[in-house]
Amino acid sequence: MLLDRPSRRNPPPSWQQLLILIGGFVAVIILIIWALISLFASLLVWLIPPELEAQIGSVLIKEYEQKATKGIVQDTLNALQDLLEAKQPAKDRRDLKVIYLPDKTVNAFAIPGDRIIIFRGLLENVKSENELMMVLGHEIGHFANRDHLRGIARSLSLQIILSLIIGNNSGLQSLGSLTAAITQASFSQNQELAADRVGLDLLVGVYGHAGGAIDFFDRLGKNSSANTLSFFSTHPHPDKRVKKLKQIIRNRKIAVEPVKPLPTELGQ
Protein backbone atom coordinates (compact mmCIF):
# COMPACT_ATOMS: atom_id res chain seq x y z
CA MET A 1 0.00 0.00 0.00
CA LEU A 2 2.88 2.35 0.69
CA LEU A 3 4.05 1.98 -2.91
CA ASP A 4 0.79 3.48 -4.17
CA ARG A 5 1.33 6.74 -2.34
CA PRO A 6 3.02 9.60 -4.28
CA SER A 7 6.48 10.35 -2.96
CA ARG A 8 6.73 13.69 -1.20
CA ARG A 9 10.50 13.59 -1.34
CA ASN A 10 10.64 13.69 -5.16
CA PRO A 11 7.60 15.60 -6.41
CA PRO A 12 7.21 15.93 -10.19
CA PRO A 13 8.76 19.13 -11.60
CA SER A 14 6.41 22.03 -11.99
CA TRP A 15 5.87 23.94 -15.25
CA GLN A 16 7.80 26.84 -13.76
CA GLN A 17 10.81 24.63 -13.10
CA LEU A 18 10.66 23.18 -16.61
CA LEU A 19 10.52 26.64 -18.13
CA ILE A 20 13.54 27.73 -16.07
CA LEU A 21 15.49 24.67 -17.23
CA ILE A 22 14.55 25.24 -20.87
CA GLY A 23 15.36 28.93 -20.59
CA GLY A 24 18.75 28.16 -19.09
CA PHE A 25 19.50 25.65 -21.84
CA VAL A 26 18.54 28.14 -24.56
CA ALA A 27 20.65 30.85 -22.90
CA VAL A 28 23.71 28.57 -22.88
CA ILE A 29 23.19 27.74 -26.55
CA ILE A 30 22.89 31.45 -27.42
CA LEU A 31 26.08 32.25 -25.50
CA ILE A 32 27.96 29.48 -27.29
CA ILE A 33 26.75 30.67 -30.70
CA TRP A 34 27.60 34.27 -29.78
CA ALA A 35 31.11 33.24 -28.72
CA LEU A 36 31.65 31.30 -31.95
CA ILE A 37 30.41 34.16 -34.13
CA SER A 38 32.58 36.66 -32.21
CA LEU A 39 35.63 34.40 -32.54
CA PHE A 40 35.05 33.91 -36.25
CA ALA A 41 34.56 37.65 -36.76
CA SER A 42 37.76 38.43 -34.83
CA LEU A 43 39.72 36.15 -37.15
CA LEU A 44 37.95 37.46 -40.24
CA VAL A 45 38.87 41.12 -39.66
CA TRP A 46 42.47 40.44 -40.73
CA LEU A 47 41.19 39.30 -44.12
CA ILE A 48 39.18 42.47 -44.78
CA PRO A 49 41.13 44.68 -47.23
CA PRO A 50 41.23 48.45 -46.55
CA GLU A 51 39.15 49.04 -49.70
CA LEU A 52 36.27 46.94 -48.35
CA GLU A 53 36.59 48.54 -44.94
CA ALA A 54 36.30 51.96 -46.59
CA GLN A 55 33.08 50.85 -48.27
CA ILE A 56 31.71 49.62 -44.94
CA GLY A 57 32.48 52.95 -43.33
CA SER A 58 31.46 55.24 -46.18
CA VAL A 59 27.86 55.69 -45.02
CA LEU A 60 28.93 56.23 -41.42
CA ILE A 61 31.55 58.75 -42.44
CA LYS A 62 28.93 60.81 -44.25
CA GLU A 63 26.70 60.76 -41.18
CA TYR A 64 29.45 61.97 -38.86
CA GLU A 65 30.74 64.52 -41.34
CA GLN A 66 27.28 66.07 -41.46
CA LYS A 67 27.49 66.64 -37.70
CA ALA A 68 31.12 67.78 -37.78
CA THR A 69 32.42 71.30 -37.33
CA LYS A 70 34.93 71.97 -40.06
CA GLY A 71 37.52 74.65 -39.55
CA ILE A 72 40.67 75.44 -37.64
CA VAL A 73 40.01 72.97 -34.78
CA GLN A 74 39.51 69.99 -37.07
CA ASP A 75 42.46 71.07 -39.24
CA THR A 76 44.70 71.32 -36.18
CA LEU A 77 43.62 67.89 -34.95
CA ASN A 78 44.47 66.42 -38.33
CA ALA A 79 47.87 68.13 -38.36
CA LEU A 80 48.67 66.60 -34.96
CA GLN A 81 47.41 63.21 -36.09
CA ASP A 82 49.67 63.41 -39.16
CA LEU A 83 52.70 63.88 -36.89
CA LEU A 84 51.84 60.68 -35.06
CA GLU A 85 51.08 58.65 -38.16
CA ALA A 86 54.41 59.67 -39.68
CA LYS A 87 56.09 57.76 -36.83
CA GLN A 88 54.36 54.51 -37.76
CA PRO A 89 56.02 51.85 -39.89
CA ALA A 90 55.21 52.52 -43.55
CA LYS A 91 53.17 49.30 -43.80
CA ASP A 92 50.81 50.46 -41.03
CA ARG A 93 50.04 53.95 -42.35
CA ARG A 94 46.45 54.41 -43.47
CA ASP A 95 46.00 58.13 -44.22
CA LEU A 96 43.76 58.59 -41.19
CA LYS A 97 41.55 61.64 -40.79
CA VAL A 98 39.98 63.20 -37.68
CA ILE A 99 36.34 64.24 -37.57
CA TYR A 100 35.58 66.82 -34.88
CA LEU A 101 32.10 66.83 -33.32
CA PRO A 102 30.94 69.86 -31.26
CA ASP A 103 29.41 67.76 -28.51
CA LYS A 104 30.17 67.81 -24.78
CA THR A 105 30.54 64.04 -24.70
CA VAL A 106 33.99 63.06 -23.44
CA ASN A 107 34.96 60.40 -25.94
CA ALA A 108 36.99 59.42 -28.97
CA PHE A 109 36.75 56.31 -31.11
CA ALA A 110 37.81 54.82 -34.44
CA ILE A 111 35.38 53.92 -37.21
CA PRO A 112 35.83 51.95 -40.45
CA GLY A 113 37.05 54.06 -43.33
CA ASP A 114 40.11 55.41 -41.49
CA ARG A 115 38.36 58.03 -39.38
CA ILE A 116 38.91 59.03 -35.76
CA ILE A 117 35.99 60.76 -34.05
CA ILE A 118 36.91 63.38 -31.45
CA PHE A 119 34.28 65.15 -29.33
CA ARG A 120 34.58 68.68 -28.00
CA GLY A 121 34.05 67.34 -24.49
CA LEU A 122 37.29 65.42 -24.75
CA LEU A 123 39.21 68.51 -25.88
CA GLU A 124 37.84 70.37 -22.89
CA ASN A 125 39.28 67.69 -20.60
CA VAL A 126 42.83 67.55 -21.95
CA LYS A 127 45.35 69.99 -20.49
CA SER A 128 48.31 69.61 -22.85
CA GLU A 129 49.18 68.77 -26.43
CA ASN A 130 50.94 65.63 -25.20
CA GLU A 131 47.79 64.33 -23.51
CA LEU A 132 45.80 64.84 -26.69
CA MET A 133 48.49 63.15 -28.75
CA MET A 134 48.38 60.12 -26.45
CA VAL A 135 44.62 59.84 -27.00
CA LEU A 136 45.05 60.15 -30.77
CA GLY A 137 47.91 57.64 -30.69
CA HIS A 138 45.75 55.25 -28.70
CA GLU A 139 43.05 55.37 -31.40
CA ILE A 140 45.71 54.82 -34.08
CA GLY A 141 46.67 51.74 -32.08
CA HIS A 142 43.13 50.38 -32.43
CA PHE A 143 43.43 50.77 -36.19
CA ALA A 144 46.80 49.03 -36.21
CA ASN A 145 45.29 46.07 -34.31
CA ARG A 146 41.95 46.26 -36.17
CA ASP A 147 40.15 46.48 -32.84
CA HIS A 148 37.55 48.85 -34.29
CA LEU A 149 36.33 46.06 -36.56
CA ARG A 150 36.43 43.48 -33.76
CA GLY A 151 34.32 45.72 -31.52
CA ILE A 152 31.72 46.20 -34.24
CA ALA A 153 31.60 42.46 -34.88
CA ARG A 154 30.99 41.71 -31.21
CA SER A 155 28.28 44.35 -30.95
CA LEU A 156 26.49 43.07 -34.04
CA SER A 157 26.89 39.37 -33.27
CA LEU A 158 24.11 39.35 -30.66
CA GLN A 159 21.82 41.19 -33.08
CA ILE A 160 22.59 38.54 -35.69
CA ILE A 161 21.66 35.76 -33.27
CA LEU A 162 18.40 37.45 -32.27
CA SER A 163 17.53 38.04 -35.92
CA LEU A 164 18.07 34.34 -36.65
CA ILE A 165 15.90 33.35 -33.70
CA ILE A 166 12.98 35.68 -34.36
CA GLY A 167 13.36 35.64 -38.14
CA ASN A 168 13.53 39.41 -38.50
CA ASN A 169 16.65 41.12 -39.84
CA SER A 170 15.22 44.61 -40.26
CA GLY A 171 17.27 45.87 -37.31
CA LEU A 172 20.52 44.81 -38.98
CA GLN A 173 19.63 46.71 -42.15
CA SER A 174 19.33 50.08 -40.47
CA LEU A 175 22.08 52.65 -40.23
CA GLY A 176 21.14 53.15 -36.59
CA SER A 177 22.16 49.58 -35.74
CA LEU A 178 25.58 50.01 -37.31
CA THR A 179 26.05 53.41 -35.68
CA ALA A 180 25.11 51.97 -32.30
CA ALA A 181 27.54 49.10 -32.85
CA ILE A 182 30.29 51.64 -33.51
CA THR A 183 29.61 53.93 -30.55
CA GLN A 184 28.89 51.11 -28.08
CA ALA A 185 31.78 48.86 -29.12
CA SER A 186 34.08 48.21 -26.19
CA PHE A 187 37.50 46.64 -26.00
CA SER A 188 39.10 44.21 -23.61
CA GLN A 189 41.81 45.20 -21.15
CA ASN A 190 44.38 43.50 -23.39
CA GLN A 191 43.18 45.37 -26.47
CA GLU A 192 43.25 48.68 -24.62
CA LEU A 193 46.74 48.00 -23.32
CA ALA A 194 47.95 47.05 -26.82
CA ALA A 195 46.52 50.32 -28.17
CA ASP A 196 48.16 52.19 -25.28
CA ARG A 197 51.52 50.68 -26.21
CA VAL A 198 51.14 51.92 -29.78
CA GLY A 199 50.08 55.34 -28.51
CA LEU A 200 53.04 55.51 -26.14
CA ASP A 201 55.50 54.53 -28.90
CA LEU A 202 54.09 57.21 -31.21
CA LEU A 203 54.11 59.81 -28.43
CA VAL A 204 57.76 59.12 -27.67
CA GLY A 205 58.51 59.12 -31.38
CA VAL A 206 57.14 62.65 -31.75
CA TYR A 207 58.41 64.26 -28.53
CA GLY A 208 61.29 62.04 -27.46
CA HIS A 209 59.77 61.45 -24.02
CA ALA A 210 56.62 60.12 -22.31
CA GLY A 211 55.40 63.33 -20.70
CA GLY A 212 51.58 63.46 -20.78
CA ALA A 213 51.16 59.75 -21.49
CA ILE A 214 49.07 59.03 -18.39
CA ASP A 215 47.77 62.48 -17.43
CA PHE A 216 44.43 62.37 -19.25
CA PHE A 217 43.55 58.83 -18.17
CA ASP A 218 44.65 59.51 -14.60
CA ARG A 219 42.56 62.66 -14.32
CA LEU A 220 39.52 61.15 -16.03
CA GLY A 221 39.58 58.21 -13.64
CA LYS A 222 38.95 60.64 -10.80
CA ASN A 223 36.09 62.33 -12.65
CA SER A 224 32.63 60.75 -12.59
CA SER A 225 30.59 63.47 -14.27
CA ALA A 226 27.74 62.55 -16.60
CA ASN A 227 29.72 63.58 -19.68
CA THR A 228 32.49 61.08 -18.91
CA LEU A 229 30.13 58.11 -18.78
CA SER A 230 30.37 57.64 -22.56
CA PHE A 231 34.12 57.23 -22.27
CA PHE A 232 33.78 54.65 -19.49
CA SER A 233 31.11 52.76 -21.46
CA THR A 234 33.53 52.12 -24.35
CA HIS A 235 36.82 52.03 -22.41
CA PRO A 236 37.79 50.16 -19.25
CA HIS A 237 38.25 52.25 -16.12
CA PRO A 238 41.66 53.88 -16.46
CA ASP A 239 43.18 52.96 -13.07
CA LYS A 240 44.75 49.68 -14.21
CA ARG A 241 45.87 51.23 -17.49
CA VAL A 242 47.61 54.08 -15.70
CA LYS A 243 49.49 51.64 -13.47
CA LYS A 244 50.50 49.52 -16.45
CA LEU A 245 51.66 52.54 -18.45
CA LYS A 246 53.71 53.74 -15.50
CA GLN A 247 55.30 50.30 -15.29
CA ILE A 248 56.12 50.26 -19.01
CA ILE A 249 57.63 53.74 -18.86
CA ARG A 250 59.68 52.76 -15.83
CA ASN A 251 60.84 49.41 -17.25
CA ARG A 252 61.83 50.96 -20.57
CA LYS A 253 63.49 53.86 -18.77
CA ILE A 254 61.66 56.42 -20.92
CA ALA A 255 62.25 60.00 -19.87
CA VAL A 256 59.27 62.02 -18.64
CA GLU A 257 59.73 65.68 -19.44
CA PRO A 258 57.53 68.81 -19.32
CA VAL A 259 54.60 68.82 -21.74
CA LYS A 260 53.62 71.32 -24.40
CA PRO A 261 50.49 73.46 -23.98
CA LEU A 262 47.57 72.83 -26.27
CA PRO A 263 47.73 74.76 -29.54
CA THR A 264 45.83 78.04 -29.29
CA GLU A 265 43.77 76.93 -32.31
CA LEU A 266 42.05 74.39 -30.11
CA GLY A 267 40.56 77.14 -28.00
CA GLN A 268 42.21 76.28 -24.70
Image (tube, helix red, strand yellow):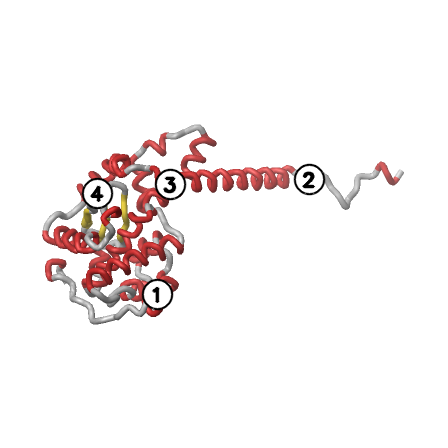
* Residue at disc 1, secondary structure: helix
**Closer to the eye: label 1 or 4:** 1
Q: Quadrant of residue 14?
A: top right
Disc 1 marks which amino acid?
Ile
Q: CA distance from mark 2 to mark 3?
A: 40 Å
- On the image, the x and y values in percent for residue 100 come to 18, 50
Residue beneath disc 3: 153
What residue sits 10% from the left and 53% below the top?
Answer: 72
Disc ID at residue 248: 1
Number of residues whose C-alpha sits closer than 10 Å to that of mark 1, classed few (under 14), some (14–19) or many (20 or more): some
Q: Is residue 250 left or right of residue 31?
A: left
Along the line of sight, the residue nearer the viewer: 4 or 122: 122
Q: CA distance from mark 3 to mark 1?
A: 30 Å
- On the image, the x and y values in percent for residue 143 come to 29, 47
Sequence order check, earlier mark of 1 and 4: 4
What residue sits 19% from the left and 45% below the top?
Answer: 95
Q: CA distance from mark 1 to mark 2?
A: 57 Å
